[in-house]
Image (tube, grey):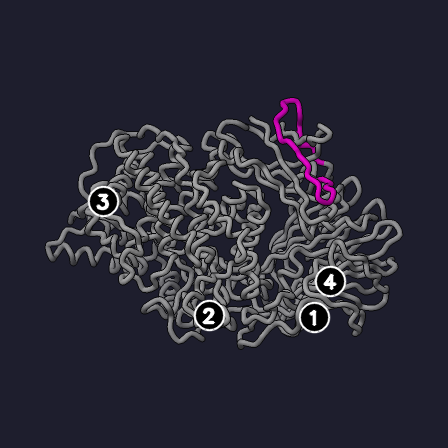
Amino acid sequence: MSNVPITLKEEHGIEHQGALFTLGVPFQRGALQSTRHLILKSAASNEQRPHQVACTSRWPDGSIRWVRLDFLADLAPHATDQYTLSEDSGADNTDSPWRLRQTEHDLVIEGPRGALKLHQSGLAWRQTTVESDTPTDYQASLKGPDDHQATAHPHQPWHVKDNGPVLCRIANSGTWLDGAGNALVDYRCELTLLNEGTTLIVDVVTHNPRRALHPGGLWDLGDPGSVHIRSLTVSAHRTQTSGGWLKERPHSPALPLPANVTTGIYQDSSGGEHWHSQNHIDANGNSTTSFRGYRINEADRLVAEGHRASPIIALSDAHSPLMASMRRFWQEFPSSLNHREGTLTLGLFPEEYDGTFELQGGEQKAFTVFFAQSTRESALDWTQAPAIPVIPASCYESAQVIPWFRAQRTDDRLTTLINEGVDGPDNFFAKREHIDEYGWRHFGDLFADHESLYQPEGAPPLISHYNNQYDAIYGFARQFALTGDRRWFELMDDLARHVRDIDVYRTNEDRTEYNHGLFWHTDHYLDAKTATHRTFSRLNDTSSTPGQTGGGPAAEHCYTTGLLLHGWMTGQCESVETSVALTKWMKHAHEGTGGLLEQVLAIKKQELPKFKQMLRGERPTSHRYPFTRGTGNYINSILDAWLATGDDDWATLAEKVIVATIHPNDDIEARDLLNVETGWHYLVLLTAIAKYLMLSAIMAHKSATVHYAQAALCHYARWMLEHERPFLSDPSQLEYPNDTWVAQDIRKAMVLFQAAWLDDEERKERYEREARGWLDNVATTLTASPERTFTRILVILMQNDGMDAGYRVALAESAEPSRGYGTPALSWPALVARVVARLARGARHFHPAKEKAWLALRLDR
């Protein structure tokens, strides 16, 4: 394998001491067989550094595609350090300093300088260190809406997830029960020990597994499926302390805290100019923020106040003070840090908030807090502005882990337009301020500023959320891989975390076509109001979508690639798991689960219309899937699941869908693709097929469908050469003729660039000339457009970036020779066979209780 350089750059003037750095590193097919002999060296000292490596993805031949790398390092303010990951056959990085002991009631983890004792009966644990004679007792606590303490009931005992030279991670999951033993919400908790046992990271996820009732397909706050929480805290207690201190941010002087008086900091709002935004309302439309920023109180006395805090709090101890901090303290308000009589209390959902916290049906929220036992006051400063490890763009290119990725982009004008997202006056960070896209439910999502286009001049911007439409996560990930700019990383990471928590409908209790699906962007040109991130609100009399009065997670708006790439690039396995879970939801939405009533309904919707056509003497096609972006996104998600799991059944499913959607001899005119409002979706579908061909080439996948798909894509590309025109060439056919349609034209350029790779050599020059013309028109028009910085336009450009880079991979030889493709016309025997197959599937899966439940969910809308 080639050496992989890793750069750490400190950009906030913060000292990093014992900081944890985690990143994903990709490898070429066949380059790395095992992680056992990987070594990490400091460029400054050429000394090996302790590190931990885990394989997170493999190539079809079993070699390693991605690893997660963890290591600890010190980094001076404004410093840049270099490391190198390489392979040494004589090295062995599997030794672990952590000793584990399991008893009947406890799990004990011992490190060189500290130990953790975990009680199996709940969410409490004790930490000891060699520097201190006094143990620290921790507890996670939740109060229900009646202010009564809930009881943590584990579903499984504490178990070890990672154990290596750098860290040990243990996990637990269960349910919070009220005083009567009824389930309130589920929880997951992970504890990570590092720095030889003196630093502890606590990740807590609170999840409402119930379904929303969403009457009429409307998804507002106040739904009966919601759960209300009074508070969620993590506390740390010591019996022998002498007060403490509090810093408002890493550079601030420490404020002494008296031992026997409750003193703390509470962040009530973002502290921004629009802190009182209508983004922050409860189910009744009342504001949930009461003052700007944060306040520090000692008992009932105001000590200090400000706008945005990134605080660190500590218990004083002569031997080993205990410090604590919280990830995204002000960004994910409300939040608090408190100290009293030897106890630190971190308010994730803080008691200081005047009300309850509503977790909607299927919604979750993840929090991260940090504890360190150290005599160095700056031991946790790094948690408030962590440095981002960067590897060269050439590593991603050579490993072929991002489709159509080149380390050098070919069109500078497209680069300039995309860079408006971080460098322009209305960049993505500035957009957050317009509607105050902050708070525990909102932070990380993108303000859909394009939805304010038709508002009266001077009107406040609509509260509109984008919910990863067109896969902004993927766009941000791609730009970070290209540039190494931490701003792209932050946008990617913040949005991925938000999507995992808020935008995915995590329930098993609703319709299968909703369960674990992705909510799409909020309603076009209307305020989200109390629907938050769930599209349709009862407070809007009409919808921007003609005939639409409600809805839920929609397969046409599902994007999985960004989550998959984020999980691999950051080592956050939950993003990979979420990507695969979304694909399973897409499969259920498109294929069903097999119930008899479900199959009868499918016959009515799909086979019966074709039956009527054939009775009229028409010749319907054999296609079973709609020629839309929904099918394109379905194919794309299946390909992502194939990559994530290595299971070839996913490749088989992708091929089944492709063959049942498109044909090399389709009558394209009959598709009515030039009807822009409905026809433009085909470009998303063709791009998904191009991705299938690209991945098949990279992974040496042999199948007759490869050449079938190639022929079909080229058939449509040739049609495009003769018939396609700019979307805005006839504005009268568009409901909203704006420059988003110019951005959408980039899809035509990228399909033609792919056709130049796939079609006959004699057509290559024309494809590339026409594609370049489309790209030139997009870049020229948008450069002069005042709409060029709109979220939707920037995300479309980023999603389609790179396919013009001349990236070429040879297609594998087919597993069987082509015998010609015939016509896509449907025959009577084939139609009858479909109906029989559906009925047989329904009969195999028939169960009266399931049929009754299926029907009840559809009658109870």
Tag 4: residue type?
A: Leu
Q: Mark 3 near mark 2, Cβ–Cβ under 8 Å?
A: no
> Label 3 is placed on what type of residue?
Glu
Return the disc, 2 or 1, that comes first in the chain's sequence.
1
Q: Is residue 623 visible?
A: yes
Q: Quadrant of the N terminus?
A: top right
Residue type beneath disc 2: Asp
Helix, strand or loop at label 3? It is helix
Q: Residue at x 57, y 39 (%)?
A: 24
Residue contact at pointers 3 and 4, CB within 8 angstroms: no
Q: Is residue 187 left or right of residue 849?
A: right
Contact check, label 1 and label 3, Cβ < 8 Å = no
Q: Of callouts 4 and 1, which one flags the residue occurring earlier in the amino acid sequence?
A: 4
Mark earlier in primary sequence (3, 4): 4
Which numbered disc, 2 or 1, marks the residue closer to the eye? 2
The tag on residue 527 is: 2
Residue under pointer 3:
722
Question: Looking at the image, is mark 3 or mark 4 nearer the viewer?
Answer: 3
Residue neighbourhood size for the residue with mark 4, other residues' Cα within 10 Å, grouped as few (<14), some (14–19), many (≥20): many
Where's residue 312, x and y in %? 75, 56
Horizontal side of 175 relative to 451 (left or right) equals right
Q: Earlier in the sequence, mark 1 or mark 3?
A: 1
- For label 4, the residue is 337
Mark 3 / mark 2, whichever is N-terminal: 2
Q: CA distance from mark 2 to mark 4?
A: 34 Å
Q: Quadrant of residue 438?
A: bottom right
Can you identify the residue that label 1 sits on? Answer: 352
Q: Which residues are magenta?
A: 73-96
Residue at screen point 70% across, 44% down: 78
Q: Residue at x 80, y 72 (%)?
A: 299
Observer-nearest of 611 and 241? 241
